[in-house]
Image (cartoon, rainbow, N blue to C red):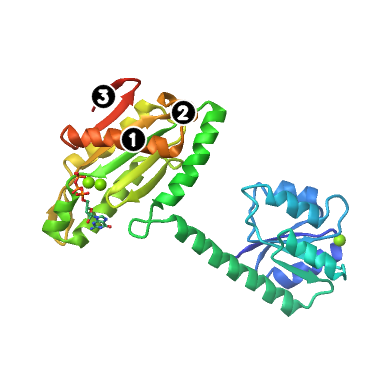
């Protein structure tokens, strides 16, 4: 698939020139001003923004500063394209976040090489980002990502008046699976379990490995009943399910604790909610495992 390059340039002849050079290799989209660019961006996030500096209306410098304040745009790499022959301006461009800076008139081969280099760095950066938030074994989010994302979700929920719930899930007697069938069988179970949960939660919920055989889910914009229901459906899905590991049958269950932001005290943190869900999980283990416990004010229910 071709990368998309969004070119913001007020000069028609430069736009045409860039189109001739780049259109074979890239999907080029053109804007003649910042104003036009802001209309295109919500529809198309480009792989690179080629940004002229001197334009009527917003300058390239104005634009990059605005982009850096928007979560959805701040990771778009910007290459400034300009006739300015002043290294102080180039330095300023880099200081405010440009990836590269190319002076007009540009050399075709050099322009192409610089674009390729930015794409390579960006690709590497994206891989690192995914890597840093992903659990290696199961491919779901890791604990670090969970706490970061959950913090924002709580903040958003408090501002919007929407609820959210946090569930802690822990596989029952998981050590026995490792001990009787081997560590690979344990890994297999962890993967099957995460697949099962992924198929039941909604795309905007956050599902992460908290550690070992312990998992955490944030149910975004979701009430307690619905959250418990989703966890209960995972539990029900596992009840009569037998997986085959190297032709040997393996069955497992889990216990869970669920808490709701609405029932927490004011100013509660993610860490406190997770701790609270963990306390409910502990009760679930104590009451015989393979069950879910949630807290409704002072009432503890078991399902
Ligand atoms: P409980 O029902 O009380 O939760 O018992 P349990 O056996 O599930 O809990 P325990 O904490 O005693 O054992 C958890 C085991 O999970 C111990 C550890 O070796 C194993 N474990 C942790 N991470 C992994 C992993 O990535 N792969 C495998 N195969 N095992 C793991
Ligand atoms: Mg210009
Ligand atoms: Mg366990
Ligand atoms: Mg555990």
Marks counted in the figure total 3
Instruction: Report x, y in % for residue 302.
Output: 23, 27
Q: Are marks 2 and 1 in contact (CB under 8 Å)?
A: no
Other residues around mark 3 within 10 Å, as few (<14) / some (14–19) / many (≥20): few
Mark identifier at residue 301: 3
**Mark 1 or 3, nearer chain start:** 1
Residue at mark 1: 277
Q: Is residue 188 above or below residue 298?
A: below
Determine whether the residue tagged by mark 3 lies in a helix, strand or loop. Answer: strand
Q: CA distance from mark 2 to mark 1?
A: 16 Å
**Mark 2 or 1, nearer chain start:** 2
Residue at mark 2: 163
Asked whether mark 3 and ligand 1 are closer than 8 Å, the reply comes as no
Other residues around mark 2 within 10 Å, as few (<14) / some (14–19) / many (≥20): many
Q: CA distance from mark 1 to mark 3?
A: 13 Å
Query: Is any atom of residue 25 visible in this view?
Result: no
Looking at the image, residue 150 sits to the left or right of residue 248; the answer is right
């Amino acid at each position: 698939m071709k990368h998309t390059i969004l070119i913001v340039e007020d000069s028609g002849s430069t736009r045409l020139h860039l189109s001739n050079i780049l259109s074979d290799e890239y999907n080029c989209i053109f804007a003649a001003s910042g104003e036009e660019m802001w209309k295109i961006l919500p529809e198309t996030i480009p792989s690179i923004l080629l940004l002229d500096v001197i334009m009527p209306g917003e300058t390239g410098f104005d634009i990059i500063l605005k982009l850096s304040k928007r979560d959805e745009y701040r990771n778009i790499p910007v290459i400034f394209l300009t006739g300015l022959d002043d290294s102080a301006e180039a330095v300023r461009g880099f200081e405010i976040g440009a990836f590269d800076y190319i002076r007009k008139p540009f050399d075709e081969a050099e322009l192409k090489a610089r674009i390729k280099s930015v794409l390579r760095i960006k690709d590497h950066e994206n891989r690192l980002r995914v890597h840093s938030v992903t659990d290696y074994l199961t491919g779901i989010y890791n604990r670090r990502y969970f706490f970061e994302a959950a913090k924002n979700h709580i903040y958003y929920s408090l501002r919007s008046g929407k609820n959210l719930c946090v569930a802690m899930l822990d596989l029952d007697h998981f050590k026995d699976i490792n001990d009787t069938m081997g560590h690979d069988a344990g890994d297999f179970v962890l993967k099957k379990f995460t697949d099962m949960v992924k198929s039941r939660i909604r795309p905007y919920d956050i599902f992460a490995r908290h550690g070992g055989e312990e998992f955490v889910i944030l149910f975004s914009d979701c009430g307690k009943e619905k959250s418990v229901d989703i966890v209960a459906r995972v539990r029900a899905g596992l009840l009569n399910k037998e997986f085959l590991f190297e032709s040997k049958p393996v069955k497992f269950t889990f216990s869970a604790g669920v808490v709701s932001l609405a029932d927490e005290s004011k100013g509660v943190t993610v860490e406190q909610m997770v701790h609270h869900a963990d306390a409910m999980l502990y009760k679930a283990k104590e009451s015989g495992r393979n069950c879910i416990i949630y807290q409704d004010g002072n009432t503890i229910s078991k399902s």
